[in-house]
Amino acid sequence: MITLRVVVDQLISPVPGGLGRYTEELTRSLISTAPTDCAVEGIVSASSAENYAQIEAALPGLAGLHKMALARRELSAAWQLGVATSAGHGLVHAPGLFAPLRRHDRARDETQVAVTVHDVLAWTHPESLTPTTVAWTKVMLKRARKHADAIVVPSHALADQLREVMDFGDRVRVIGGAVSSGLTLPTNSAAAEALAVSLKLPDQYILTAGTLEPRRAVTALITALGLPGAADLPLIVLGPDSWGDLTLASVADEAGLAPDRVRAMHGLTDQELALVMSRASVFVYPSLEEGFGLPIIQAFQFGTPVIHSDAPALVEAAGDAGFAVERGDAAGYPERLSAALERVLGDTELATRLRIFGSDRAKAFTWRDTAERVWQLHADL
């Protein structure tokens, strides 16, 4: 029996976030696609019985849970220093850089460790992260360069960026993610309408996702809505209503928008998020840099027209299914976003074409395909 151990610690993190969702979906799919005579176990830091039960409930079919002797903070410090742990033996797959990276002989002891890099923001946009996260990320990537047998990245664009940051030779493998299996609409129209009323959704609206940090360019989109002749629709932002001292209200006010034109929505359930995505007139993702384009793939799945920046990872994810806007000079970006909105919202034929192409494009990303490629990666190693 061959056992693949997956680091599932993010599932019980205080804020699981996107990495927690990625970890859960990937591990669940690895379990369901496991080849004959192969099994999947989890690796988790020392925690409570309730947390262990939470993981086992989220991952039915998990062959076992390897419980480390150290709590998450102490385990992170130990792995950062390369301290040997029992979790480092056999096949190990880490959904992030939190992994037992140390010297090993793959041929002799059949140990192999693959880690996942989701972005290189610690180098390109360190202001987007805490100083502690930046330092930890840089240390762990250096350990990965020395000891990882494979580096998984979600896009070719990120592979190119990673190559500029650090040389991993031929160890980089591009394996994308997919939309969460739980992101589904209510089963009947009455339930959908009731949910729309409870969320106070307008009949028509522009949707975006992200925070007010400069890299996400939500500020540029709000500025675009205040320009002469801009689309006169409300904007819903999937994310918090503030970032540092900035608030959506203050940015909207500076753009000359009425207070009720911009609204934040966060903490949504999967079903609520699906409904908000599906009913948007257009989804705009102006981010200046991403490692993968999951938000636009989510919008594609619900047939929502998508406008996105020409950030390489977003262009790669969208193919020909989105309407790309050149980032170019920052001063002219709002004008270009405004022009794109005018094109898509004012051209029914274009919007319909984007809906059809997007729905088709979404089918190219499945967790089953992701899991099968991860199994193949470890088989190749």
Image: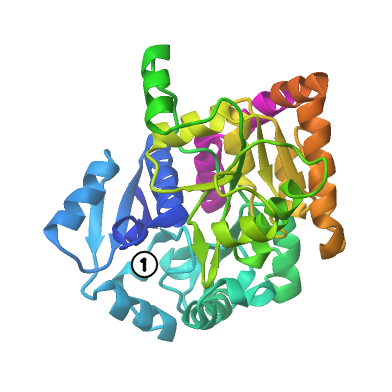
Residue beneath label 1, please? 89
Residue 60's spot in the image, x, y percent?
Answer: 27, 39
Tell whether position 144 is magenta: no
* In-front residue for pair 12/342: 342
* As drawn, 196 above or below 306: above
Q: Which residues are magenta?
A: 357-379
Q: Is residue 304 above or below residue 295?
A: above
Q: Position of residue 221 (x, y in %)?
A: 70, 51
Residue drawn at x 71%, y 36% as measured from the top left: 232
Q: Residues within 10 Å of mark 1 (few under 14, many from 20)?
A: some
SS at badge 1: loop
In the image, 88: left or right of 277? left
Q: Residue 206 versus residue 143: which sits nearer the camera?
A: 206
Query: Identity of the amino acid at label 1?
Result: His
Vertical placement of 372 versus 19: above or below? above
| Residue 263 placement (x, y as % from top left) | 52, 46
